[in-house]
Image (cartoon, coloured by chain):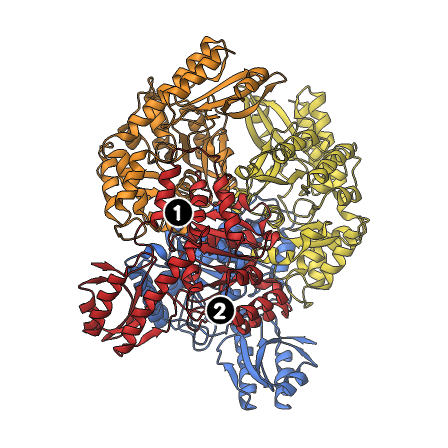
Chain colours: A yellow, B blue, C orange, D red
Amino acid sequence: MIRFNNDYNHGAHPQILEALARTNTERYGGYGIDPWCEKAADEIRKYLDCPDAAIHFLIGGTQVNYTAISAALRPYQSVISADTGHINVHETGAVEHCGHKIQALSARDGKITAAQIEEEARLYRDSDIPEHVTQPKLVYLSFPTEYGTIYSLDELTQISRVCREYGLFLFIDGARLGYGLGAAENDVTMKDLAHLADMFYCGGTKCGALFGEALVITNPSLNVDFRSYIKQNGAMLAKGWLLGLQFCTLFENGLYFEITRRATELAQQIRRAFAEKGIPAYIESPTNQQFVVLENSQMDALAEKYIFEFEKKVDDTHSCVRFCTSWATTQEEIDALTADIRAL
Amino acid sequence: MIRFNNDYNHGAHPQILEALARTNTERYGGYGIDPWCEKAADEIRKYLDCPDAAIHFLIGGTQVNYTAISAALRPYQSVISADTGHINVHETGAVEHCGHKIQALSARDGKITAAQIEEEARLYRDSDIPEHVTQPKLVYLSFPTEYGTIYSLDELTQISRVCREYGLFLFIDGARLGYGLGAAENDVTMKDLAHLADMFYCGGTKCGALFGEALVITNPSLNVDFRSYIKQNGAMLAKGWLLGLQFCTLFENGLYFEITRRATELAQQIRRAFAEKGIPAYIESPTNQQFVVLENSQMDALAEKYIFEFEKKVDDTHSCVRFCTSWATTQEEIDALTADIRAL
Amino acid sequence: MIRFNNDYNHGAHPQILEALARTNTERYGGYGIDPWCEKAADEIRKYLDCPDAAIHFLIGGTQVNYTAISAALRPYQSVISADTGHINVHETGAVEHCGHKIQALSARDGKITAAQIEEEARLYRDSDIPEHVTQPKLVYLSFPTEYGTIYSLDELTQISRVCREYGLFLFIDGARLGYGLGAAENDVTMKDLAHLADMFYCGGTKCGALFGEALVITNPSLNVDFRSYIKQNGAMLAKGWLLGLQFCTLFENGLYFEITRRATELAQQIRRAFAEKGIPAYIESPTNQQFVVLENSQMDALAEKYIFEFEKKVDDTHSCVRFCTSWATTQEEIDALTADIRAL
Amino acid sequence: MIRFNNDYNHGAHPQILEALARTNTERYGGYGIDPWCEKAADEIRKYLDCPDAAIHFLIGGTQVNYTAISAALRPYQSVISADTGHINVHETGAVEHCGHKIQALSARDGKITAAQIEEEARLYRDSDIPEHVTQPKLVYLSFPTEYGTIYSLDELTQISRVCREYGLFLFIDGARLGYGLGAAENDVTMKDLAHLADMFYCGGTKCGALFGEALVITNPSLNVDFRSYIKQNGAMLAKGWLLGLQFCTLFENGLYFEITRRATELAQQIRRAFAEKGIPAYIESPTNQQFVVLENSQMDALAEKYIFEFEKKVDDTHSCVRFCTSWATTQEEIDALTADIRAL
């Protein structure tokens, strides 16, 4: 069976395992205070044009999301998110568990707009009795989104402008960042993210690492005592250098961008194969996740050789499913799949 | 410089790195539902005499502590702990962050007694207006303790009896479990822990793994929907098999016990060297952590060649410091240190 | 100016003030352990056909809502509510502040249906990976709703059936309970609420008391140590008898039902006056709250003599407003308003 | 039976009931936005020399304590309190329920010192790894304390100085404020509290009101959106004017000070009677609470006619008990008690 079900179904890029083996007998200070974390932060900063950005290495995405969001908010403040946002639908209510309401906006193709955000913010600002509702204070976006779509630079710029006008923080979930940056139609850079957002992260778990996410905080007010939040939320790895080492490996020679761009290109081959076969996309995605609407018989046929993710029933005879490539997907796997799509 | 400052200052046992390399191109289901986690749980269960024990793999100790404790308690319930307990002094208030008071009892050598616990429990049970105070509902112990001491089987049995009489859960923090089980004077087994406690964990981070803790839940009422707590608390590793694989490696041939027992024996060489030199122990420890009271000049002399942990000032001329061995400590390192102790 | 803006804009029914004056020099035990609370509970139980129901007196509605909901739920469990439900829109995220997600269902006339609830519950029950989402565990309804509408006995019975089938608790917010029970078209009794719900409350603040809500818990599992939750949530009045005394006064001779039924009847006079004038209801309400869509010029005209609540802009020339009667509204006030409506 | 068990065992000062009766048919805006709250705040401000102080009216003490404390703190910050402090021993862990650790300092006569506070604050400030522990950020004191003792102006000034030097907020629980200000040996004024603390409150529940506490916030940074915290914590009374009206009655002619000073004087008569009888004070208290150590036979004798509070067993034949006066205690009640003490 060939796995296209997600982008975290096998180990790490070989260079990372080599780095682990090479340094295994070295000894380091704990909790992320070590030369590898320092160097990894420097390597990432090279892409940011933001020399004072703080960079913290955490273990996984849910952890980063709730730690960063709850550190930014006071108890009566809430998060604006797409209703399809990962924090709203796949993190077991972790943000609410930290005490904060998510104001879920109706997403289109996984995305929300500056206008939608402004409407929420203005409603609160203009209220006579704001104390009866939560105060929207942070906007959560995913880049790329949970449906593989990406925000354009213009869209992000408008969202950032609204956030600053209304005093909202902008936080971008980059669990799959590489796959978005590497899309053919993408016009956003890490520099842009650093300038437009207050915090964002470069996902490692889904982009070549064994595990780990690099959180970039460019708004210094959000970085005050941030390590206390990391520790309190169980997100401080004792052997923190394991995170630094991995991100060093990924960023010092651009490996991160190279391997994810390639995965995105492979996914576009799948996209084209489905399109040529006349199988409709559920949502058009320029990145490594492809959502298509299969006839159930097609779904069953492909399921004999491939593992992919069932998303939902569309009607009695059709289903929406996801095919996902990763840095580890091979051209051979793609060739097999596209041949089988053509043969459906 | 030779590091004796803690037991998490370098990578993993070589067999673990080999296992990672060997399996790196395999593909697995995510979130801990995979053959390695299943097999690791089976291997651990062999030591338990408790075939129905649930076993979950989490990433780090703080995470396990607050996840397990807060899953066990209702909002008005509190935790009984030694005042020196890790949850009370080194986890940034994570348990309180989850909403629960810690009732800290005065520890002796890092330990609390059945009698102390019973007094707290009885006070609550006999109160006319219990609703004005929190209800003690879970006892947290560390084995070995933060000072390297261990509970005897008799002490644990008495504590367990009090817990059951008063309806308290017993949870044992085994971040350094191996080092305690391997102590010459220890008479407690993993079977005993499984029978006496409701939950305990086998620490991996400090005992040979890159990271990871294996939580054993023997009280089925505490296991209901436990994976939801893991996910909500950011403690569910996407590539969960990395945890299973490590614990398999550690437990399938007893490696866990072997490497930690050796570290404990090395620590006893340090202990004897200090004793023979007339340097007093701060607390007598039969495990891998040694706390001694040095003259400041002695401390400065040793600090030229060794990294160890300053604990606190004892008086103007003396300090309490910790020397800690690990599975990675070598006989050569011990020989160097003991020679230098003798030469003080 | 005559106030129709809400049902809590003036003091208490005169009998309550008389009771306070009559007993002011008596001395009582504190925190709700006193003869008045005991007697009030007995008086309320007479309406329930549920002799073992536990009854607790709390101070206000938001307080009851979050205290009862968070006492019923484990951290990973969520609340199903109408999107227009008070807990979702007017309580500053108090439920989320206690750590729980609200799964807001699209309401029709302020109400949700058994089918909607069942769909949510089934989705969770049938999920392969439930640990990634919150578990719906409690349904929150308002009777009457925030829009003045009421559930029929049949609707409530169906909802209760779904809740029991899927193991959900049913909690009914009765902040305006009297106004709903007294509606001409209502077929629900307090007995029905006691049998169909696990918890509900009889609102005092809006129904004749100075303040206070009587929470009825008929599911004994939800009553375990409930006073601890009350105290911890700041909802235990030191002079608890003040609550018992008020509810005694309201319930021992049926005053509660009499004064709220009358207010509902007065509101129907407003409803008819608007209808006869051809002014459309925003939602048809059989209780004490009337929502109508006024031309802005009509709104301005009425605002010269009456205080009522602006709800929202409907279009450039129309607004939705609320007129609300209470136990304290007089026939003269209604006559003045209806005459002015006719004269618009 | 004559009640000396606490200071909240009967209704309100007659002037308050008269004010309620007089205004019962008036109609007001809700949630504390009304002329009575405004006027009450003005009356209290006259005693403060702090024209910009914000004043909020809440319902009860536990509610004020956790609302104010949790509004002031970030998640990783903790509260310094006497171990005997009300928040540490009688509020069902409400502060921890809000997520914050209480660092309990060993109290002497219910009080803590500037030196103790400074030691905690310095320990944190000087730590190399502060992220592993909570940050002390707020000092909670009671005036008078839970044992009836009071801080001198000099003691409070020193504590305030330490707080400002280390960036800690100072919050003073004044549930019994009047009884402390009226003590013969007191040298602290409300002006002093306003200048030395960041927040404090004037208790109403125990000092003549039916219920209610007036929270004074003199540090404007702590007042940002404070009404949102009140609402979210269930502490916003719908008919808020009931609180304003009561505090107006208490403060506009100094009634608050007069009635509590008298109660304190009556308590001193009890104190002298015990002393003259040779019955030792458990703690010497200049305010309305008297703690004495009775022989059990004496306790039983007095219990035939008086209700007082058992505190704890001192030894097999002695018990510590509390006698408490209030604004409602009469000279006749005192005369009876002191005669019976003399007759023991």
Query: Could you say which is closer to the camera, residue A91 or residue D226?
Result: D226
Vertical side of A17 occupied by C247: above or below: above
Residue A343, given in percent of the width and then of the height, sits at 66, 23
Residue A117, given in percent of the width and then of the height, sits at 66, 33
Query: Could you say which is closer to the camera, residue B330 or residue C81?
Result: C81
Q: Name, please, the residue furthest toward the front.
A: D253
Vertical side of A142 occupied by B243: above or below: below
Image side of residue D106 versus residue A115, left or right: left
Total of numbered circles in the picture? 2
Image side of residue B212 versus residue A220, left or right: left
The label shown at residue D187 is 2
Q: What element carries label 2?
A: loop
Looking at the image, which residue is at 69% across and 24% down? A274
Crowdedness of circle 2 by 10 Å Cα count: few (<14), some, many (20+)? some
- Given the image, what chain letter belongs to the residue carrying mark 2? D
Residue B105, given in percent of the width and then of the height, sits at 41, 69
Looking at the image, which residue is at 46% across and 55% down? D202
Residue B265, given in percent of the width and then of the height, sits at 53, 77
Q: Is mark 1 on a helix, strand or loop?
A: loop
Q: In which quarter of the image is residue A312?
A: top right
Amino acid type of the residue tagged 1 in the rendering: Ala
For the question of whether residue C102 can be seen, the reply is yes
Q: Name the residue under label 1.
A: C235
The lab-note entry on whether marks 2 and 1 share a chain reads no
